[in-house]
Amino acid sequence: MRTRSITSKIPQLRLASGYNIPQVGFGLWKIPPEQTANAVYHAIKAGYRHIDGAYGYKNSVEAGEGIRRAIREGLVSRADLFITSKLWNNYHARRHAIEMAHVETDAWGLDYLDLFLIHFPIAQQYIPLSESRFPSWYLDASRTRVTPRAPVPISETWQVLESLVAPGPEQPSPTTTSSGFLRSLGVSNFNAQLLYDLTSHARVPPSVLQVEHHPYLAQPSLLRAARDLGIQVTAYSTFGPQSFLELDNPRARDVVPLLQAEPVVRAAARLRRTPAQVLLRWCTQRGLVVIPKSVHPDRMAENLDCCSFDLTVEEMDAISSLDRGLRFNDPGMTHGSPLHIF
């Protein structure tokens, strides 16, 4: 069966927790809730076994519905899947992080999450979940009231998440009171200095760093730092500006789309692949995890099939030469927030 054939070709990368993460996953960012259940179901049907979500995407409940449908129909078992979610900025404090981890796991309708990330390295004022209609940098939909920062250090957030980690195949639980429904921990949008600080006190080492990564933002130094620390890297927004055109990001409008970049198009023509597959392979060939998003089954299958061919050294170098340090997901600019993280 073609689905099984593609799935079997997806490499599994070893995490510091001792678990494996599929190198190609399915991302849920910007998928409308009303489309999410169907998209996740079809992604699993296409062969995806790694689903990347977040509380901030506001579609976890629907993603869980798609997963349960796939399990009911016998497409997969829970053990076949690797589910990632993320802790939003308003819930970094000790008791709020515990609450959010429980709420998010319950929203997916699962007994455990395979990976739980700190979404951004910044804490904002707590908002009760009953009032949290806008999991963003603002208190309201009109973006007139900025959510204030909260004085919560990353060390506090990490320590409480450690208490929720289940004993793994190689990483024991840090406490004897662990409730054990998170298998691996990680971070998102952290720089190298924050990784060095985190690993200086972490009893459960971070398994994954998720960051924006594409040929316009290759971040070689950050990747080296993560690898030196034994942290796997997940790339988001692999297609660069393509992911941000619908957000009316001026940086995305003012640059050549990566899907049209000359070295990408040239490699795609030689390989008889799509530019999207070439961009994904450029990442996976560098050892990164990718999490492309699509709501179209044919595109899902195309994106998944990105590890069955290789780019030449010259093609890898030509695509890497596009690097210009151009970041698209910058809250201080993308979202108009005064909270400048990068």
Image (cartoon, rainbow, N blue to C red):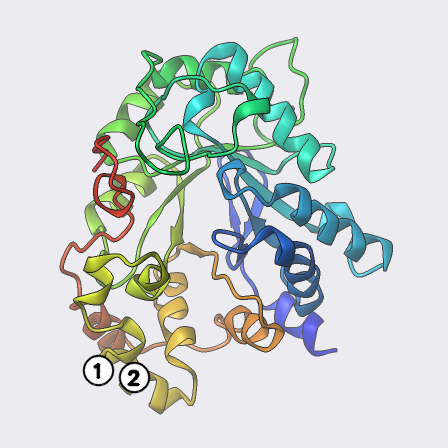
What percent of the width, then of the height, locates residue 83?
A: 61, 44
Given residues 173 and 327, the one toward you in this image is: 327
Residue positioned 36% across, 38% down in the render: 142
Can you say whether 277 is above or below 139 in the image?
below
Give the camera-side residue of 254 and 66. Answer: 254
Query: Where 256 falls versus 214 (above or below)?
Result: below
Residue 192 placement (x, y as % from top left): 24, 35
Q: Say if residue 6 shows up in the picture.
A: yes
Q: Where the C terminus falls, by quadrant? A: top left
Residue type at tag 1? Glu
Say if 189 sits above or below 44 in the image: above
Q: Dot 2 corresponds to which residue?
A: 265
Q: Position of residue 9 (x, y in %)?
A: 58, 68
In the picture, measured across the screen, residue 273 lies left or right of residue 297, that is left
Per the image, the residue denoted by label 1 is: 262
Q: What residue do we see at 54% from left, 75% from top? A: 299
